[in-house]
Image: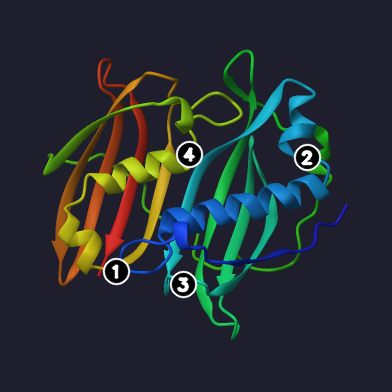
Amino acid sequence: MTAGIWTDEVRVRSYDVTPQGTASVLTLADYFQEAAGRHAAELGVSMTDLRADGQAWVLAFMHMQVERLPHQNESIRIETWPSGLESASAHREFVFHDEEGTVLAGGTSRWFVFDVDRRRPVRPPRVLADIEGPDRPGPIDQDLDALSAPAHTDREQTFTARYHDLDLNRHVNNVRYLEWALETLPAAVLDERRCLGFAVQFEAETRLGDPVRASAEQIEDGGTLRVRHRLAHAESDQTLALVRTTWL
């Protein structure tokens, strides 16, 4: 089966914007995953399809580069497509355009199929190997330095996983990790600087009631702020996710 390019159009809603009047990278991450889910359903490998076999999709990695964040009420077009299998992971690309066709953001992602009962990744179902993605290059360079934990802690905050943080797999939704990482930053960064993108690597799941410690190291680099984030279980210190954000 040849998979085409899935396209969604969405208007940025009032509850999706920050105090600056633009969507956040959290919003774009949510929009992408909604589009990816609809495309997966068309291809017969939706979350519902996998759950019939006791499996689920789990996001392992996402890298997004941002040219411009859309404003409230702006219409944007999201394109996404599968770009192949590598070992046990499935790759998917995505790009956002404004109404004039100008690229707003783009990125790449890797997904695992997860055994819901055994709580661990498993080999993807055969049907995925039969899906051939379109002959289109990804929107960003996939060569990215490995994410690393902060060398020291400039800022730290602790959260508790709440019921409404959970997804269908009954673990914390992946975008919530990114939200917790951003919450460690000073308001001056969030208010006055522009996010150029992020990369997030998920290491372990978080369950209801788990305490999560988010730490950050801020590195100024010639006018660009690079931040290394680590999310860890606050009691066991197990790494849950590593994040890198970049700001101008």
Local packing at callout 3 (Cα closer than 10 Å; few below 14, some 14-19, many 20+) is many
What residue is pinned by disc 1? 194
Callout 4 secondary element: helix
**Residue at image location 83% in from the left, 42% down from the top:** 44
Callout 1 secondary element: loop
Quadrant that contains the C terminus? bottom left
Query: Closer to the observer: label 3 or label 2?
Result: 3
**Residue at image location 61% in from the left, 13% down from the top:** 118
**Residue at image location 58% in from the left, 74% down from the top:** 75
Query: Closer to the observer: label 2 or label 4?
Result: 4
Work out whether mark 3 precedes mark 2 in sequence or the reverse, and give the earlier one: 2
**Residue at image location 69% in from the left, 58% down from the top:** 81
What residue is pinned by disc 2? 45
**Front residue of this view, candidates 70 and 219:** 70
Where 94 sits versus 160, above or below?
Answer: below
Residue 70, percent from left and from top? 46, 72
Q: Quadrant of residue 113?
A: top right
